[in-house]
Image: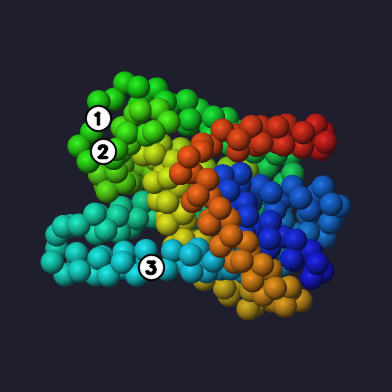
């Protein structure tokens, strides 16, 4: 892999991991569009430098997220330690911490068992393009369900002030039950398929449970951090072993690019979702995915 290819893929990963448009889907289809045949062949191989390269992309992205949310993580980790010692959940931060723990479990277990075979099976341009279209429809359906649920639901305990745009009550993140947190975590499992966005699917799950876009995005980004970091650390032997030979330098460069891009992406998106919705990303995924399907067929 050339260094300039690594830089492009690193920036692409850092942006699309946080934007609800599927990082894995984009890193599969763009090499095919650019004619990078060596990368395309490596993506669907059972053992290749691509799997080692992804380790660096994941670690770099996770570090960018940790730096952006460093103060939040300091409070969350401290709250978890205090809550575990007292054996009681007493504050919103403690509840948020345990929600993140519970929501991480489904993807962690499924990722250990199925991440490699799913990546090999679906890391091809046509399936990834098709699932980008599916991802767009999921985002659109999530927005539709949120509006319908908000119209029917009475104001819940712990709701925020009314949304200035719609007048509907906004549910506070700390009011989610552990069961609801687990369901959001289950939704994250589908992001193992190239084309389905991790941030998008978890945001949709949060919106359906009554969260506003800002809190759904915050929970999604916090939830992604341990999974992405753990996946990178778990696969670190691939990078240090024989499959990483010849791409370690490129991986370091790509990881730095991914981390910087992730930091700027999450900074942009936390502001975006204060007043805007998933609809533009839904339109993009359906349009881009459909165009790709025509191109590759």
User: Can you see residue 205?
Assistant: no
What is the distance, in whole Å, between disc 1 and disc 3 at their CAs? 31 Å
Residue at 63% from the left image edge and 55% from the top image edge = 15
State which quarter of the image contains the N terminus: bottom right
Residue at the spot x=31%, y=64% of the render? 76
**Is 54 on the left-hand or right-hand side of 203?**
right
Q: CA distance from mark 3 to mark 2?
A: 24 Å
Residue at numbered disc 3: 71
Task: Name the N-terminal-most of marks 3 and 2.
Answer: 3
First-in-chain label (1 vs 3): 3
Rendered view: 248 above or below 265: below
Look at the numbered discs 2 and 1 and tell me whether their residues touch, using CB distance below 8 Å: yes
* The C terminus - image quarter: top right
Give the percent coordinates (x, y) of residue 103: 36, 51
283 in relation to 41, above or below: above
Residue 8: give x, y in percent of width and height: 75, 61
Residue at image point 27% right, 58% down: 93
Comparing 228 with 95, the one in front is 95
Residue 177 picture quarter: top left
Q: CA distance from mark 2 to mark 1?
A: 7 Å
Residue furthest out toward the front: 164
The residue carrying mark 1 is 155
- Residue highlighted by disc 2: 159
Considering the numbered disc 2 on the image, is that residue within a helix, a strand or a loop? strand
Percent across and percent down for residue 172 are 29, 43
């Amino acid at each position: 892999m050339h260094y300039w290819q690594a830089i492009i893929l690193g920036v692409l990963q850092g942006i699309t991991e946080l934007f609800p448009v599927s990082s894995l889907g984009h890193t599969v289809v763009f090499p095919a569009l650019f004619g990078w045949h060596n990368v395309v062949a490596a993506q669907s191989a059972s053992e290749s430098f691509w799997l080692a390269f992804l380790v660096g992309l994941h670690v770099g992205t996770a570090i960018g997220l940790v730096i952006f949310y460093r103060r939040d993580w300091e409070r969350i980790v401290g709250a978890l330690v205090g809550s575990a010692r007292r054996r009681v959940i007493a504050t919103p931060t403690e509840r948020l911490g345990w929600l993140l723990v519970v929501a991480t479990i489904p993807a962690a277990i499924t990722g250990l068992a199925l991440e490699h075979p799913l990546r090999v099976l679906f890391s091809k341009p046509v399936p990834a393009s098709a699932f980008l279209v599916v991802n767009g429809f999921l985002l659109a359906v999530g927005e539709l369900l949120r509006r319908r649920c908000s119209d029917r639901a009475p104001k819940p305990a712990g709701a925020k002030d009314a949304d200035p745009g719609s007048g509907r009550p906004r549910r506070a993140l700390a009011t989610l039950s552990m069961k609801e947190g687990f369901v959001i975590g289950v939704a994250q499992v589908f992001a193992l398929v190239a084309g389905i966005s991790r941030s998008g699917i978890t945001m949709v799950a949060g919106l359906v449970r009554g969260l506003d876009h800002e809190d759904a995005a915050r929970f999604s980004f916090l939830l992604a951090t341990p999974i992405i970091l753990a996946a990178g650390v778990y696969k670190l032997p691939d990078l240090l072993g024989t499959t990483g030979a010849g791409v370690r330098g490129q991986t370091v460069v790509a990881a730095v690019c991914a981390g910087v891009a992730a930091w700027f992406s999450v900074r942009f998106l936390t502001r975006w979702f204060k007043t805007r919705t998933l609809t533009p990303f839904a339109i993009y995924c359906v349009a881009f995915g459909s165009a790709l399907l025509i191109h590759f067929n």
